[in-house]
Image (cartoon, helix red, strand yellow):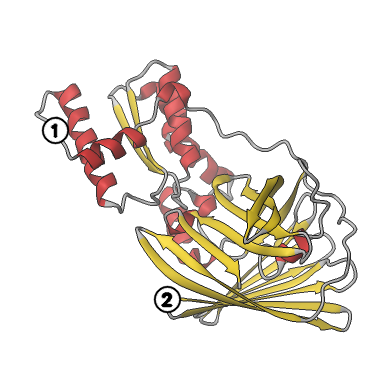
Amino acid sequence: LMASIPPYWEAGRKIFALRMGDENTEEGKKILHEASPLFSVNKIKAPLLIIQGANDPRVNKAESDQIVIALRDKKAEVAYLLADDEGHGFAKPVNNLGLFAAAEKFLAQHVGTRYQESMAEDVAKRLKENTVDISKVTYAKKSVVPALKTWPSLSPDITTANYIYKGNLQVQGQNIPVEMQRSVIVNGEYLDITDNTSVMGQQIKDMATFTKTGLLPVKQITEQGPVKITSSYLQDKVDVVMDVNGKITSKSLQPEGIAFLDGAGSDMIIARFPLTPGYSTAFYVADGQVQKLKKIILKVTGNEMVNGINTTVVSLVNDDNANETTTLYIDPAKKMAIKLEQVLPAMMNARLTLSLQ
């Protein structure tokens, strides 16, 4: 929890450190360890119903998994509800109704209260989907794919051009139109790519700079409302600066391998990787909002026809959260994605789809 707090919540982090313990001191670590239910699992006597949103950015799913495993292994009474389309608390009525039904039955089983067995068909279906077989809960496995240590040799054949992508954002049953305009400019020794995205009247501007030769990332600037995030890619580190209404936080990140950016034009760079059948690799990207590194696993998963073009399908998955995925449908001739699909766990598993016009 403490590690997941973003830098712009610094005031909140200080309050949590005061109330619960400071993870950056030995004394604080001792307090946190002693207070943790995981390290006192043998003291837990009452049956426990654990409820988790898979996309909770604060209380990570892995924390619920590990307490379920610990209780299961000591033969304690434990039940587990996990919604793959929820975050910090359940927001969807069908999930909430299922939660209430499960909690009512759980209490009836253990303290003798009443419960209503009947429920709407859609609620019963969703509750069944959200009910986890605790015998199958395992610790999340990290990928064994090693991160790139050296930048691959890429063809520097990207030229000045403009593109338009259109699509939609599917979130909580809504289909919201999205349009993205891309500008590619060769600027001397550098390549500047800007994606301007319009969704629900909001503008998101993402600017990326690469070296013209080798296509190495140099800088990324993302602007949305009052937030501006600048990531500077240096030889062995990424310096990230976040400006929120003039309040600035910064951090220097040191990846154990190649650092890449997942913003404007990244599909055009990836399209120049050696995307042969079965090809896979990994690299790090800087998540500017939380100022941390994410390991991304890249895999060529096959081919698919898109608008009459036999595209190469490339999957990008966050090694720490398998729900966070991007799928690129790359035109081998154009050397860019003509379609992309992205799942956004922070937006309750919203799905963004964009197609080149």
Q: Nearer the viewer, residue 348 or 226?
A: 348
Q: Residues within 10 Å of mark 2 (few under 14, many from 20)?
A: few
Q: Nearer the viewer, residue 271 or 209?
A: 271
Local SS, label 1:
loop
Residue that carries the numbered disc 2 in the rendered image: 200
- Residue 352: x and y, percent? 51, 61
- Residue 100: x and y, percent? 21, 40
Q: Nearer the viewer, residue 221 or 203?
A: 203
* Mark 1 residue type: Ser
Q: Residue pushed farthest front? A: 308
* Mark 2 residue type: Met
Label drawn at residue 333: none
Residue 238 shows in the view: yes
Q: Residues within 10 Å of mark 1 (few under 14, many from 20)?
A: few
Local SS, label 2:
loop
Of the two numbered discs 1 and 2 on the same chain, state the one appearing first in sequence.
1
Q: Is residue 239 left or right of residue 273?
A: left
